[in-house]
Image: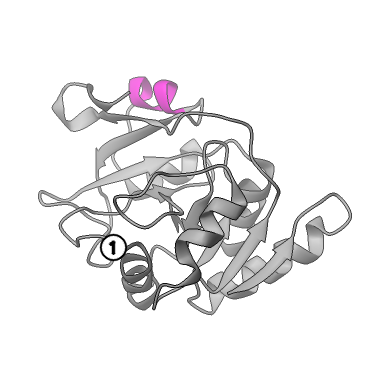
Amino acid sequence: MKLIKLNKKSFNIVLKEAERAVREGKVVICPTDTVYGLCANALNQKAVNKVFKIKKRSKKKPLSVFAKSIGEASKISFLGKAEAEKMKSGKVTGILKAKRKFPKGVLAKGGTIGVRIPDHVFIKKLLKMVKTPLTGTSANVSGKPASMNIKEILLQFEKEKYKPDLVIDSGNLKKRKPSTVVDFTREGRTIRK
């Protein structure tokens, strides 16, 4: 695991390093507007598989994705105006019918996908640079709590066989809740508040 500090001075250098890592199929721990996330190219099967190994997550539980904007979300999923309004805040992961193929582990049975538009400057710029959806799952081993504390996250992965390739240390994030998950394919049923 390579660790790099993110601050105002290093922002552009770190952003370029994260872009390169994603393009190479690597998995990156990034700060987001909720908790730290495990980000990888959501269209790259090897990268997606690596996220599952790192998280020790069952493939029966698909990964959601980050999209850079409502426009990008509507290119990968069937997104109506009402759904788009609810997803604009960035705090909602919408379960939507997918428009395109994704690697195994991203789409759920029935061809649905979880999509979120994060509201964090670093992840937004990274999405703009890589021009691909990124995996949008919390940076933790399945069964352990998601965290805003970078030291806690590093400790979780320290002795694991599979580790993220790059860790972007933005310090401890402000205490926030994970996104609300709304299944728009089931009349807007809230799955997680």
One can see residue 108 in this view: yes
| Residue drawn at the location 10% of the way across and 48% of the way down | 110
Name the foreground residue: 177 vs 117: 177
**Residue 5 image position (x, y, % from top left):** 75, 60
Q: Is residue 40 visible?
A: no
Predominant secondary structure in magenta?
helix
Quadrant for the C terminus in the image: top left
Q: Which residues are magenta?
A: 81-87
Counting from the top left corner in percent of width and height, residue 132 is at 49, 60
Q: Nearer the viewer, residue 145 or 61?
A: 145
Q: Residue at label 1?
A: 102
Residue 59 against residue 75 in the figure, above or below: below
Q: Residue at x 50, y 44 (%)?
A: 147
Is residue 154 found left or right of 98 in the rendered image? right
Coloured how?
Answer: one colour
Residue type marked 1: Phe
Question: Seen in the image, is 66 located left or right of residue 114?
Answer: right
Could you say which quadrant of the image residue 131 lies in? bottom right
Specify whether residue 120 is painted magenta. no
Q: How many numbered discs sit on the rendered protein?
A: 1
- Residue at the image position 47 percent from the left and 46 percent from the top: 72
Task: Classify residue 94 by image quadrant.
Answer: top left
Residue at the outermost right position:
9
